[in-house]
Image: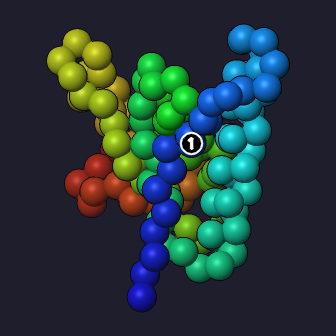
Amino acid sequence: MDLDVLYEIDVPKPWKGARPHGRRAAEQRACREAVEQIRLADRMGFRTVWAVERHFREGRSHCPASEVLLGHLTALTERIRLGFGVTLTPFGFTPPQRIAEKVAAVDVLSGPPRSSSPPWTRTW
C-alpha cells in the first residue's frame, strides 16, 4: 500500500507573545515540525509529500510558497517524492509560466524519479 502525506502547515491560535513576534515564532516552530515529520515519513517509506499553497489564512495553512518548502526538502530527504498539492492559478495572480518554473525547479533539485510532476513537465 502506498501512503502519501499532505501539508498545509497549520498554526492555530492563540499564539504566545505579542503580535507579530508571537505569530512568527509559532510559524517557525510549525515549519520545523512539518519538516521533521516529512523527514520521518521519508524514512518510514511514505510515497509522496504534497505541499499546499495558501495565502492570507491566519491560523491555518501558513505555506504561501510551497516551492520553497519542497526545495528545502530536496536536501533533507532521500526517497519520498515531492509534489504540489495545491497551486493557486487565478487570472492575474500566477501565470501558467510561473507554475511551470516552480515545478521545473523542484524537478531539477530533486532529480528523477523523486519528482511528482506530470510526465509532460519533466522535459522542461
**Residue in view at x 45 percent, y 69 percent:** 4
**Residue in view at x 21 percent, y 22 percent:** 90
* Up-down relation of residue 42 to residue 34 (above or below): below
* Up-down relation of residue 120 to residue 105 (above or below): below
Please tell me which residue lies in front, 111 or 117: 117
Please tell me which residue lies in front, 118 or 111: 118
Q: How many marks?
A: 1
- What is the residue that sits farthest to the left in this orientation? 91
Q: Which residue is mark 1?
A: 9
**Based on the displayed image, in which of its 4 quarters is residue 30 positioned?**
top right
* Up-down relation of residue 91 to residue 84 (above or below): above
**Secondary element at tag 1:** loop
**Quadrant of the image containing the N terminus:** bottom left
**Quadrant of the image containing the C terminus:** top left
**Residue in view at x 56 percent, y 40 percent:** 10
Please tell me which residue lies in front, 36 or 101: 36
Q: Tell me residue 41's x, y (percent).
A: 62, 69
- What is the residue that sits farthest to the bottom in this orientation? 1
* Up-down relation of residue 70 to residue 27 (above or below): below
**Based on the displayed image, in which of its 4 quarters is residue 53 positioned?**
top left
Q: Is residue 99 visible?
A: yes
- What is the residue that sits farthest to the front in this orientation? 14
Q: Tell me residue 27's x, y (percent).
A: 68, 31
* Mark 1 burial class by Cα count in 10 Å: few <14, some 14-19, many 20+: many
Position of 106 compared to 24: left or right?
A: left
**Residue in view at x 49 percent, y 44 percent:** 8
Q: Is residue 67 visible?
A: no
Q: Tell me residue 65's x, y (percent).
A: 50, 30
State how the image is colored: rainbow
Going by the numbered disc 1, the residue's amino acid type is: Ile
Q: Tell me residue 17's x, y (percent).
A: 81, 19
